[in-house]
Image (cartoon, rainbow, N blue to C red):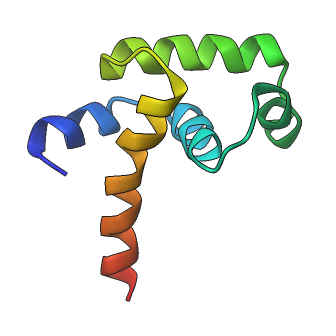
């Protein structure tokens, strides 16, 4: 992940990072809400802030953004 992308990732709150991870795993808003014990509207609010912070506009791009980060973490762990 490039420096600017890492700074963007670090700009996300802990909860926003959890939401990103669950989106990347294919969870729907309702599933995310249940897993994190928050309302579906709160999930939508988190997603809107995440999209704004990362400069993206849809779930597919959010998942694509997350996977390079995940891949690097897996390489570091192995």
Q: In percent of the image, x 10 and y 43: which residue is there?
A: 3
Residue 46 x, y percent position in the rendering = 59, 19
Residue furthest left as drawn: 3
Residue 69 x, y percent position in the rendering = 34, 55
Q: Please state, as top left, top right, bottom left or bottom right, where the C terminus lies in the image.
A: bottom left
Residue furthest front as drawn: 60
**11 with respect to 32 (left or right):** left
Of 16 and 74, the residue lying toward us = 74
Residue 29 x, y percent position in the rendering = 76, 26
Q: In percent of the image, x 36 and y 66: which residue is there?
A: 71
Of 23 and 38, the residue lying toward us = 23
Of 24 and 15, the residue lying toward us = 24
Number of labels in the image equals: 0
**71 with respect to 37 (left or right):** left
**19 with respect to 2 (left or right):** right
**62 with respect to 20 (left or right):** left
Residue 17 x, y percent position in the rendering = 51, 40
Q: In percent of the image, x 32 and y 79: which residue is there?
A: 75
In terms of image quadrants, where is residue 55?
A: top left
Q: In percent of the image, x 36 and y 40: which residue is there?
A: 65
């Amino acid at each position: 992940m490039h420096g600017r992308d890492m700074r963007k990732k670090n700009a996300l709150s802990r909860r926003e990072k959890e939401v990103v991870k669950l989106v990347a795993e294919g969870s729907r808003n309702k599933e995310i809400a249940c897993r994190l014990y928050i309302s579906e509207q709160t999930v939508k609010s988190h997603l809107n802030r995440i999209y704004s912070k990362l400069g993206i506009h849809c779930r597919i791009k959010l998942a694509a953004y997350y996977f390079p980060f995940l891949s690097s973490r897996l390489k570091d762990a192995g």
